Image (cartoon, rainbow, N blue to C red):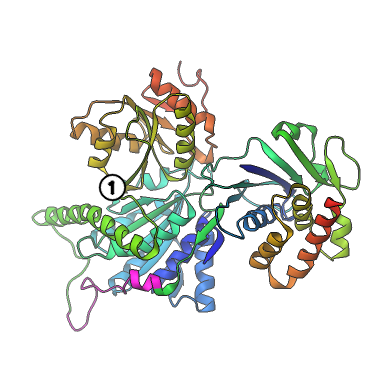
C-alpha cells in the first residue's frame, strides 16, 4: 500500500488534492483501490489541515490515520518541521512547496506555476509534482480526476498546471 | 457508474435511487452532506421529492411520520444530539409501524461536547423499535439505502429503519462506489403501497391510544414485526445480489471464523482493520477471526451463538459504554451465548470514543489480551494506572 499525507492550511486545497489523487489512481478501475480522508473536524481558513490518501491493489480496509507515509506533500512551507521525517517509511520523501531549500526535503516552487496559470492554490501543482516524481499516477489519470471532480471552468488551468509540474519533476 | 464518493454522498445516491417522496431535514455534523446532496438533487430535478427544511430534529421525525401516515415514502437523517432530541418521535414511528428510513451519522454525545464519531448515539436507541444496520464502507452504505425501504416496507415488517454510518471515518472518507442505474433500482424497489395511511375513501383511526387491556398486543406485534425483518433481510439481499451482483451476508459477516480460536466481534467501519490484523496474526500462528455485526436490531442471537460456540475466547470491540455496566453490544452478545447454552469467556473493549483513532496495534493488543486473559471491561488508550491496575 502507498500512503500519502497532505499538509496545508484551510483553503489551500490539501483535501482536494488527497481526493484527486485517489480518484486519479482508481480512474482506470480494475484492481486499483483508494481511500481519501481529511483530518476530521471543523474547517477554518488558515488553520493547519492534514489529509490522507491510501492506494493499493486490493481494497483498502484500514481506515485509521496513516502512521508511516511514502510521501508527505506540504502545500505551505511554514508547516514543514524536521520531526515530520518520523512519519516517513524508509525510502519515503517529503515534497514541499517552497522557494527556499530545505534540507532533507524536495522543494518545488509551485507558486511560480500557480501564477502562470492564474491559480489561487498550489494543490494541483503539487499533485502534478507527485505524479512526476513518484509515477504512482499518470498525468492522464490526474487529468481524468480533474475533469471528474473539479468545476468545469477551472479544469483546463489545473490540468495544464499539473502537466507542467509533472514535466518539471521528470526533468 | 463508478465514482469516488464519501459515505454521505454514497448514501445520498442510494436514497435518490430509492425515490422517497418526502425528505425532512435538519442538518447536523457529520450528517450535513447527505441532506445537502439530496437538496441539490431535488433542486436539479434528478429526485422528485418534497424537501422540507424543518426547525429541529424533533420536527424532522414528526414530519417523516406525517408523510408516512399519508402513504408517502419518507426519509430523514440525523446524528448524535439530533437523534437524542428526536428520540421521543422514534418510538411514535416504530409504534405506528411507519416504515421511515433514517440515516444516522454515528457521533459522540455530550458532555464533553464532541462532533467526532462513536456509536453511543444510536446504541442508546436500541429499544426504540427501529431496525438498526451498521455499514462498514461507502458501497455498503449506498446498498443499505436501497435495501432499507424493501425491508422496512415489507408487510411482514412495517418497521422504521435506521442505517448507521460511523461519523467522519465513513461519512467523510472517499472511496470508489458503484452507483447502480435507476432502471435496475426501480426493478429492485417498487413504489410504496400501504393500507397504513390516511385514506378518505376508507377512513380509519390511526396513532390512537391503547390502554392496559390491549397495549401488550400492539407491543407484541411490534416485536414480531422487527423479528420478521430477519427473514426479509435475507430475501432482500438475495434479490439484491441477483440484480446488482453484490452479496451481503445477513445479520452478521464472519471472517476466518471456521477454525478460529480467538474472535473479535465488532460493528461498523473498524471491522476492516480487525480483518487485516487477524490475517497478520494468523501468519504467526494465532487462529484469529472476526465477526462483524451488520444488524443490531433484529439482533443475530442464533448466528452469534453458533459462530462463537467453538472459540477459546472472544472480545467485543465497540464505540459505546453503558455507564455503570459495560458496552451495550457486549451485553447483547453475552445474552445470545447464554440463551444458547454456550459458555465461552468474553471480554469487552470500549474504543474510538469521541473519534479516538483505533490503530492496528490496538487491535493486536486485543487479540493478545484475550489469549492471556484480562479485565472484563477495558478502555482502549487508557493507561494501566487509570485503568485501576
Residue at the outermost right position: A100
Compare residues A100 and B162 and report the one nearer the observer.
A100
Q: Does residue B188 show up magenta in the picture?
A: yes
- Residue at (43% x, 66% y) in the render: B15
Left or right: where B331 falls relative to B281: left
> Which picture quadrant has residue B183?
bottom left
In the rendered image, the vertical position of residue A50 relative to residue B3, given as above or below: above
- State the image coordinates of residue B83 (x, y, percent, origin top left): 41, 53
**Residue extent of the magenta highlight:** B184-202
Compare residues B339 and B106 and report the one nearer the observer.
B339
Where is mark 1, residue-wise?
A: B127
- State the image coordinates of residue B192 (x, y, percent, origin top left): 30, 72
> Which picture quadrant has residue B52?
bottom left
- State the image coordinates of residue A114 (x, y, percent, origin top left): 84, 60
- Residue at (38% x, 19% y) in the render: B373
- Residue at (84% x, 65% y) in the render: A117
In the rendered image, the vertical position of residue A126 relative to residue B377, given as above or below: below
From where the camera sits, is residue B60 visible?
A: no
Q: Main secondary structure of the magenta part?
A: loop
Label 1, secondary structure: give it: helix
Label 1: few (<14), some (14–19) or many (≥20) C-alpha neighbours in 10 Å? few
Residue at the outermost front position: A30
Compare residues B53 and B75 and report the one nearer the observer.
B75
Compare residues B111 and A80 and report the one nearer the observer.
A80
- State the image coordinates of residue A70 (x, y, percent, origin top left): 69, 40
Amino acid at each position: 500500500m502507498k500512503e500519502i499525507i497532505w499538509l496545508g492550511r484551510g483553503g489551500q486545497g490539501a483535501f482536494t488534492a488527497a481526493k484527486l489523487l485517489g480518484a486519479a489512481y482508481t480512474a482506470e478501475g480494475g484492481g486499483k483501490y483508494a481511500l481519501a480522508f481529511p483530518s476530521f473536524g471543523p474547517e477554518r481558513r488558515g488553520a493547519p489541515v492534514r489529509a490522507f490518501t491510501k492506494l493499493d491493489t486490493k481494497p483498502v480496509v484500514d481506515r485509521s490515520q496513516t502512521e508511516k507515509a511514502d510521501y508527505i506533500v506540504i502545500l505551505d512551507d511554514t508547516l514543514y518541521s524536521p520531526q515530520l521525517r518520523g512519519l516517513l517509511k524508509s525510502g519515503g520523501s517529503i515534497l514541499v512547496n517552497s522557494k527556499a531549500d530545505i534540507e532533507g526535503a524536495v522543494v518545488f516552487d509551485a507558486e511560480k506555476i500557480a501564477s502562470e496559470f492564474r491559480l489561487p492554490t498550489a494543490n494541483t501543482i503539487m499533485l502534478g509534482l507527485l505524479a512526476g516524481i513518484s509515477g504512482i499516477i499518470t498525468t492522464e489519470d490526474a487529468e481524468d480526476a480533474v475533469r471528474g471532480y473539479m468545476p468545469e471552468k477551472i479544469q483546463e488551468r489545473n490540468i495544464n498546471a499539473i502537466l507542467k509540474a509533472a514535466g518539471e519533476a521528470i526533468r | 457508474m463508478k465514482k469516488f464518493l464519501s459515505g454521505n454522498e454514497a448514501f445520498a445516491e442510494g436514497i435518490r435511487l430509492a425515490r422517497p417522496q418526502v425528505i425532512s431535514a435538519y442538518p447536523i455534523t457529520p450528517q450535513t452532506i447527505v441532506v445537502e446532496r439530496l437538496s441539490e438533487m431535488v433542486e436539479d430535478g434528478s429526485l422528485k421529492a418534497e424537501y422540507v427544511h424543518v426547525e429541529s430534529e424533533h420536527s424532522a421525525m414528526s414530519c417523516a411520520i406525517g408523510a408516512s401516515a399519508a402513504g408517502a415514502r419518507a426519509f430523514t437523517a440525523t446524528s448524535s444530539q439530533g437523534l437524542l432530541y428526536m428520540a421521543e418521535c422514534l418510538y411514535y414511528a416504530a409504534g405506528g409501524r411507519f416504515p421511515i428510513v433514517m440515516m444516522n451519522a454515528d457521533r459522540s454525545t455530550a458532555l464533553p461536547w464532541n462532533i467526532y464519531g462513536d456509536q453511543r448515539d444510536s446504541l442508546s436507541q436500541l429499544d426504540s423499535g427501529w431496525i438498526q444496520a451498521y455499514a462498514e464502507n461507502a458501497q455498503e452504505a449506498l446498498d443499505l439505502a436501497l435495501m432499507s425501504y424493501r425491508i422496512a416496507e415489507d408487510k411482514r415488517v412495517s418497521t422504521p429503519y435506521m442505517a448507521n454510518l460511523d461519523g467522519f471515518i465513513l461519512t467523510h472518507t472517499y472511496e470508489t462506489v458503484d452507483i447502480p442505474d435507476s432502471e435496475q433500482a426501480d426493478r429492485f424497489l417498487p413504489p410504496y403501497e400501504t393500507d397504513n395511511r390516511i385514506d378518505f375513501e376508507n377512513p380509519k383511526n390511526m396513532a390512537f391510544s391503547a390502554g392496559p387491556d390491549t397495549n401488550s398486543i400492539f407491543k407484541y406485534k411490534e416485536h414480531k414485526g422487527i423479528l420478521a425483518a430477519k427473514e426479509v433481510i435475507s430475501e432482500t439481499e438475495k434479490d439484491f445480489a441477483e440484480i446488482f451482483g453484490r452479496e451481503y451476508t445477513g445479520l452478521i459477516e464472519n471472517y476466518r471464523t471456521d477454525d478460529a480460536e480467538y474472535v473479535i466481534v465488532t460493528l461498523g467501519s473498524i471491522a476492516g482493520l480487525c480483518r487485516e490484523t487477524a490475517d497478520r496474526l494468523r501468519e504467526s500462528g494465532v487462529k484469529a477471526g472476526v465477526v462483524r455485526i451488520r444488524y443490531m436490531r433484529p439482533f443475530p442471537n442464533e448466528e452469534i451463538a453458533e459462530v462463537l460456540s467453538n472459540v477459546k475466547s472472544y472480545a467485543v470491540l465497540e464505540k459505546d459504554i453503558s455507564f455503570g455496566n459495560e458496552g451495550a453490544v457486549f451485553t447483547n452478545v453475552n445474552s445470545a451465548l447464554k440463551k444458547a447454552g454456550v459458555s465461552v469467556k468474553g471480554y469487552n473493549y470500549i474504543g474510538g470514543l469521541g473519534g479516538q483513532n483505533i490503530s492496528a496495534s490496538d487491535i493486536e493488543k486485543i487479540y493478545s489480551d484475550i489469549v492471556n486473559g484480562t479485565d472484563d471491561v477495558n478502555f482502549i488508550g487508557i493507561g494501566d494506572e487509570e485503568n485501576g491496575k
